[in-house]
């Protein structure tokens, strides 16, 4: 295994563990000697990775370390380019602009050969149908990030109107529509709300009483019932 790939694999192993991992275990997973492992840890530290620990105790990677450009493989570069192009086509306007900016930042720090490959990547995203929206989807994303309740004027498939207070925890982007997954106070259960059926939306100051991660976990394990 090339050393660059081995360093990447070492980072991924350290990220998977919350507590210290012994050098012997790391060396075994990587298929290298302890001496090689110690050199790899020193190399990562030299590139800015905050790896705490020492021989005989174990090692732990502090969060926040970003991979340097040379750690991206060509397949990873293609995945980033394709993903950014998909968001630019399928995301809401603000998210589409953010995807373009993010890709530009990534390309600006890539080595010249990888930058050329990113510019010439032959992975394309087909044209998307226009998604009808009467609200600013950016407000939904903000509410999800801040774990805030939202108040929506909603119309079901039969155009029957209702006002709902919901706890949004996920936003799904489909080719023809965008959809919110949320806990609905009116129905006392998980519901899915199509963005194109929301006539108005307001983000409340009140934070919903459960953490977003807990809601998402319960939704995945339970039965999310679409709004009718």
Image (cartoon, rainbow, N blue to C red):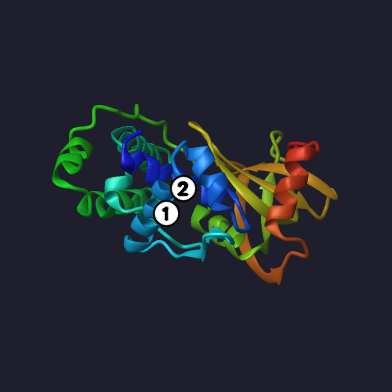
Nearer to me, 107 or 173: 107
Q: Position of residue 77 (x, y in %)?
A: 31, 39
Nearer to me, 129 or 73: 73
Q: Is residue 227 visible in the rendered structure shown here?
A: no
Instruction: Give the mark count.
Output: 2
Name the image quarter holding the C terminus: top right
Residue 203, which numbered label?
A: none
Query: Does residue 72 appear to the left or right of 130 in the view shown?
Result: left
At 70% from the left edge and 48% from the top edge, which residue is drawn? 216
Query: Does residue 202 appear to the left or right of 26 in the view shown?
Result: right
At 74% from the left edge and 52% from the top edge, which residue is drawn? 215
Name the image quarter holding the N terminus: top left
Callout 2 crowding tier (Cα within 10 Å): few <14, some 14–19, many ≥20:
some
Q: Circle 2 — which element?
A: helix
Q: Look at mark 2 in the image and give the residue it sits on.
A: 34
Nearer to me, 69 or 118: 69
Q: Position of residue 117 (x, y in %)?
A: 19, 35
Residue 178 position by quadrant? top right
Are dots 1 and 2 in contact, CB under 8 Å?
Answer: yes
Q: Is residue 98 visible in the rendered structure shown here?
A: yes
Q: Position of residue 225 (x, y in %)?
A: 78, 37
Q: Residue furthest bottom?
A: 205
Q: Circle 1 — which element?
A: helix
Q: Position of residue 204 (x, y in %)?
A: 66, 68
At 33% from the left edge and 32% from the top edge, which residue is drawn? 75
Callout 1 crowding tier (Cα within 10 Å): few <14, some 14–19, many ≥20:
some
At 18% from the left edge and 47% from the top edge, which residue is drawn? 111
Cα gap from disc 1 to disc 2, whole angstroms: 6 Å
Q: Residue furthest right?
A: 188
Q: Look at mark 1 in the image and give the residue it sits on.
A: 38
């Amino acid at each position: 295994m090339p050393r660059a790939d081995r360093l990447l694999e070492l980072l991924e192993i350290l990220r998977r563990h919350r507590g210290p991992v012994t050098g012997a275990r790391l060396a075994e997973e990587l298929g290298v000697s302890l001496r090689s492992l110690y050199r790899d840890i020193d190399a990562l530290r030299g590139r800015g990775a905050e790896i705490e620990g020492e021989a005989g105790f174990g090692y732990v990677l502090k969060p926040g370390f970003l991979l340097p450009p040379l750690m991206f493989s060509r397949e990873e570069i293609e995945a980033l380019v394709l993903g950014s192009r998909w968001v630019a086509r399928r995301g809401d306007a603000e998210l589409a602009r953010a995807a373009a900016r993010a890709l530009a930042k990534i390309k600006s720090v890539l080595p010249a050969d990888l930058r050329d490959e990113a510019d010439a990547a032959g992975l394309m995203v087909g044209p998307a149908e226009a998604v009808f929206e009467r609200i600013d989807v950016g407000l939904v994303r903000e509410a999800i990030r801040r774990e805030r309740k939202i108040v929506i004027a909603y119309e079901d498939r039969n155009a029957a109107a209702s006002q709902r207070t919901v706890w949004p925890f996920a936003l799904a982007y489909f080719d023809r529509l965008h959809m919110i997954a949320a806990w609905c106070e009116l129905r006392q259960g998980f519901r899915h709300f199509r963005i194109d059926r929301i006539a108005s939306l307001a983000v409340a100051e009140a934070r919903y009483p459960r953490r977003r991660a807990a809601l998402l976990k319960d939704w995945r394990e339970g039965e999310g019932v679409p709004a009718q």
